[in-house]
Image: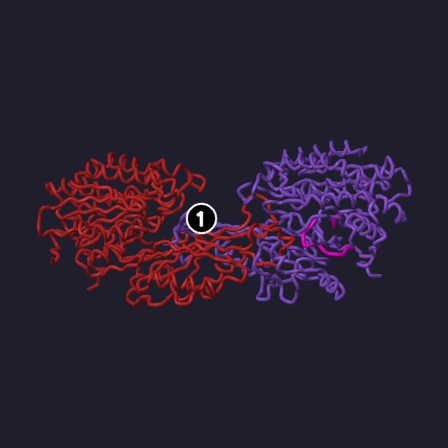
Chain colours: A purple, B red
């Protein structure tokens, strides 16, 4: 079976669904705008009250949507939101939708054309931090389930619908696994639908079949006990900024392969068939570079750009700092330097093994006279979805009806805690996302395309009926 | 002649000088404290009014000291102070004292135990930014010349005394050479005495015979037009923080030699005799490391620590920054990164040649897809003093009388615009400094030892009479 040929064009859109969405579009966008105004930045401690406010807001909104249960779940960090709307049909599948309500840091001075937390529509786009990642994509399910009910005349969804919207995804989900384990009974599902990914492009709807994992660490390098004069001491003591630079420089070999011994241990290599599927996508490197705001591709030798971002692990420096960074100059040897690294993992890589490898390697790289500390955050595992799962076919059909186009397959270079859900709940993980690469995740001027957002609503409206109709999971 | 055996112990201190200094010590320290309160940070544009205020303060104070002429000299940057006190003797030597009234940036949160611009005496030390570098060492000449007059009964100094105190030394003296050229007539001197260096230790008075030069540059590396998501794009485009790190890492080879082609062109190598003189100093590496606040020595293979800091050129990274440096993490590929480098030059190195070499080398290091810009500041040339100059012998004798000890010879790892004075005025440059390595130049908790500061006053008091007595420069 060729998973990428599953879409039947006999799946036609439903005018009742479209009419309902059109009638409620304005109120839906007003509500989303209100939510986007809450700066729920989980990585910045001073925004903790905002993350809490975001959770409260969402729980209240889900109750208004009709979910009989909508609760804020505390964690040792930021709170998550759980909601549940039973079908009433004992044989209906149970589906858990996953998303997150926290957002990346953002400040006007980073290069935003407008306040990142004052949403604004320009053209057919809604600009705000979180518009695409991930509030917009969580929120389309609220209007989606109402459209599903309105079009089918039901008073409950055709599936047992659960939502879990976490508050620490942008901080590496440090408490997510414990939360899922604690509430595993209430979260139990036959499938997990993750709405925190994207699709190929405005014109090419796709379903994502895998995500990379993520491990992050901060390495601090300490040299002199204080900044010292580069004239009096320069050339005779080790400089921690030099040590930091040499560490980062040593991350990759001359083929841009990660040079940390053991880094590639156990990884699932791409099959020839997967490489063919990637190669079939209408990839235009010039346009991709435009989306990446970059001037050249660069990466591991022997792999295409899509293979590099979807199926190969990486080591990137997300931040480096040491010494004087103000205006003018300061002739010092700095006292310390810091490197923030992140590693994208692919299926087969183990975060604990990776952490050990990075720690061991760093120890061999740091010169005498420089002390170092490494702090790892919680890791997110990689995951891959089986291409032939019946629930995946439902997602593809629902998306095909909404977009009126064939649906192709991609993977996602980004990371999410989907793998924890798969592992703890024992349920397959599927991806339903409508964001496009130009949406600017984690970047200034993040936006969502309003047309695609409403296609997301529509896909959600079709999905629950399709799942209930085509899938009777064996208990 | 062995220059290091010049000191005759028959030179004895003068009780009239010592009495005068003791009587005026308190007022002298009060005045210095008032000057140190002015945060004359030349590298930070918002402190420009303070640098101006510092110049005005000093000119007024020099007039009170008795200098018939004391003027503030404007430059396109920060102002300098010039003062002149003729001897009246047509055959007396003319001496120009050089120092600077600007200071390095300093902020309490850098690790100061007290406000850097609120001077405080703890023990026998005066703590403040500029206490040693360089206000304290400029200021000892004011009480020095008064003590000289009081002890000799003169109403004018025994030499034609000039002072030039610049306001941009900590910013690389960008307008100093032009200033000296503009006023070359009024600055004309038979010798230049630079009071902006240090001596070996509290117990070992020394005269410095050379300084390293300084060239500084900032290299900016630009990657994506904005920060981009490290998941969506990581592993497939060049990262400017990685490029910055690789650039810094490539600065040195495995022998810690600077790897920039042409860097060592033309340098004056150490002679065996100079290496012997260095080796005779009571150098204790453990104590030196303590002063350097460092845990290990590290530098160019084949040279001792003293040779590395006094007589070998260096490349140091003073600051590096790129990407996210706030709390927590941010999974981005940064849009840009910046490296601040400084190069210490030794005699024979040419700043223009160095700049060309750095620019050419950087061009070969930066990868495709990364754009770069290099900005060089004004350079300071290296200089060396002839060991057998008669004026140097006067400095050694004056210092020997004040300290009642043999005076040895050092060089200085730091840099100053002395070479410009030597070049433009055609006068030899001598060094008279009383700062010690623990004074923390450019670092938090900069201080000056009060006992040594007063020995500086005393040396200054003896020097003018000794010069007039032993030296009749041929016109």
Q: Residue at x 68, y 45 (%)?
A: A449
Q: Is residue A258 above or below residue A201?
A: below
Q: Is B249 a magenta residue?
A: no
Give the left or right position of residue B7, taking residue A144 as reference. Answer: left
Residue B166 on image: x %, y %:
28, 46
Q: Residue at x 73, y 62 (%)?
A: A280
Nearer-the-camera pick, A150 or A238? A150
Q: Is residue A275 above or below residue B106?
A: below
For residue B307, which quarter of the picture?
bottom left
Task: Tell me the SS state at disc 1.
Answer: loop
Give the left or right position of residue A264, taking residue A69 as reference. Answer: left
Report in which chain the residue with disc 1 lies: A
Residue B43 on image: x %, y %:
37, 46
Q: Is residue B46 above or below residue A252?
A: above
For label 1, the residue is A324
Nearer-the-camera pick, A214 or B293? A214
- The residue stretch that appears in magenta: A406-420
Q: Is A419 a magenta residue?
A: yes
Give the left or right position of residue B392, taking residue B45 as reference. Answer: left
């Amino acid at each position: 079976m060729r998973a990428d040929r599953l879409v039947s064009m006999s799946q036609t859109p439903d005018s009742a669904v479209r009419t309902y969405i059109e009638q409620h579009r304005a109120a839906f966008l007003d509500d989303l705008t209100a939510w986007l105004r809450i700066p729920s930045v989980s990585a910045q401690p001073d925004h903790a009250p905002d993350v809490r406010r975001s959770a409260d807001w969402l729980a209240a909104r889900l109750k208004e949507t009709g979910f009989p249960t909508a609760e804020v779940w505390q964690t040792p960090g930021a709170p998550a939101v759980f909601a549940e709307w039973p079908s009433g049909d004992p044989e209906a599948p149970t589906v858990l939708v996953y998303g997150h309500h926290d957002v990346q840091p953002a400040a006007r001075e980073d290069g935003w054309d407008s306040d990142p937390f004052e949403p604004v529509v320009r053209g057919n786009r809604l600009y705000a931090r979180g518009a695409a990642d991930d509030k917009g994509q969580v929120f389309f399910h609220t209007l989606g389930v109402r459209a599903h009910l309105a079009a089918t005349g039901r008073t409950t969804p055709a599936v047992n619908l659960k939502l879990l919207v976490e508050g620490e995804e942008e901080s590496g989900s440090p408490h997510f696994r414990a939360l899922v384990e604690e509430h595993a009974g209430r979260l139990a599902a036959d499938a997990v639908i993750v709405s925190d990914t994207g699709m190929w492009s405005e014109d090419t709807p796709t379903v994502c079949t895998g995500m990379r994992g993520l491990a992050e660490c901060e390495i601090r390098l300490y040299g002199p006990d204080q900044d010292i004069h580069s004239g009096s001491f320069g050339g005779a003591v080790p400089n921690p900024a030099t040590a930091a630079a040499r560490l980062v420089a040593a991350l990759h070999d001359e083929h841009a392969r990660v040079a940390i011994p053991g880094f590639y241990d156990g990884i699932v290599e791409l099959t020839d068939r997967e490489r063919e599927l990637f190669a079939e996508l209408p990839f235009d490197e010039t346009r991709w570079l435009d989306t990446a705001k970059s001037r050249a591709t660069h990466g591991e030798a022997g792999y295409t750009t899509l293979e590099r971002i979807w199926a190969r692990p990486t080591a990137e420096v997300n931040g480096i700092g040491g010494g004087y960074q103000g205006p003018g100059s300061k002739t010092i040897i700095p006292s310390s330097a810091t490197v923030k690294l992140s590693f994208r993992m692919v299926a087969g890589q183990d975060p604990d093994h990776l952490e050990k490898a990075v720690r061991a390697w760093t120890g061999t790289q740091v010169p005498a006279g420089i002390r170092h500390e490494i702090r790892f955050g919680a890791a997110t595992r990689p995951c891959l979805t089986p291409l032939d799962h019946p629930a995946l076919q439902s997602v593809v059909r629902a998306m095909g009806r909404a977009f009126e186009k064939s649906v192709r397959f991609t993977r996602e270079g980004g990371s999410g805690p989907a793998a924890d859900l798969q592992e703890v709940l024992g349920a397959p993980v599927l991806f339903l996302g409508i964001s496009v690469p130009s949406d600017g995740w984690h970047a200034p001027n993040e936006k969502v395309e309003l047309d695609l957002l409403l296609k997301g609503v529509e896909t959600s409206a079709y999905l629950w009926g399709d799942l209930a109709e085509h899938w009777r999971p064996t208990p």
